[in-house]
Amino acid sequence: MASEGSLMTKDTQKVRFLFKKSDDYKSHFINGVYGGLSTHGDVICNFFFEARELPSEELGTIDNGNLILSPPPEAKTIEILRELKVGIIVSPKEARDIANWILSKADEADSARKETH
């Protein structure tokens, strides 16, 4: 990713990038990533949303017209669902560029939050 404020020399040309969302473009809320390296040395990132699984049902009783829900049974193991939203495969250089861009946006967001609080 090039910096937006790089200096132009007489041998450089201006380039205009146009953005167009594909027909299947979607925004996803994610809170985690899992992956590794491909056999060719690329970085594999599988982005997911992690949350506790909802119960398949709830039981309750009606007593004098009032609904009383029964507490869910105690689970011996807490189960967390990681719903995979999207996967990307990038070169190590692209992974670093994307990571640096995300870090700079996180810093901007932190600064903006400090100003409003």
Image: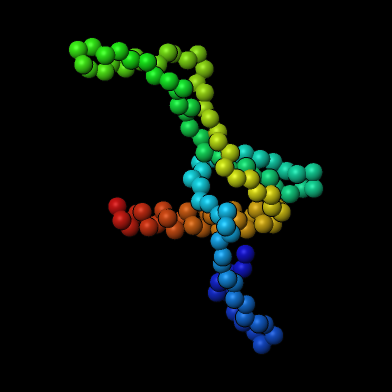
Q: Quadrant of the N terminus?
A: bottom right
Q: Is residue 56 above or below residue 82?
A: above
On the image, the x and y values in percent for residue 46 come to 62, 42
Q: Nearer the viewer, residue 22 or 42?
A: 22
Name the residue furthest right.
40
Q: Nearer the viewer, residue 81 or 109?
A: 81
Query: Seen in the image, is 94 located left or right of residue 63?
Result: right
Q: Is residue 69 above or below residue 34?
A: above
Name the residue furthest left.
64
On the image, the x and y values in percent for residue 112 come to 37, 57
Q: Residue at x 23, y 11 (%)?
A: 63
Q: Nearer the viewer, residue 113 or 34?
A: 34
The number of numbered discs placed on residues in the rendered structure image is: 0
Instruction: Confirm whether residue 100 shows in the render.
Output: no
Query: Seen in the image, is 18 located left or right of residue 89?
Result: left
Picture quarter containing residue 33? top right
On the image, the x and y values in percent for residue 20 come to 56, 65
Instruction: Confirm whether residue 22 shows in the render.
Output: yes
Q: Is residue 104 above or below residue 84?
A: below
On the image, the x and y values in percent for residue 74 come to 44, 13
Q: Residue at x 69, y 85 (%)?
A: 11
Q: Residue at x 55, y 74 (%)?
A: 5
Name the residue furthest front.
65
Give the image's coloring scheme. Answer: rainbow
Q: Residue at x 58, y 39 (%)?
A: 84
Query: Seen in the image, is 70 located left or right of residue 3?
Result: left
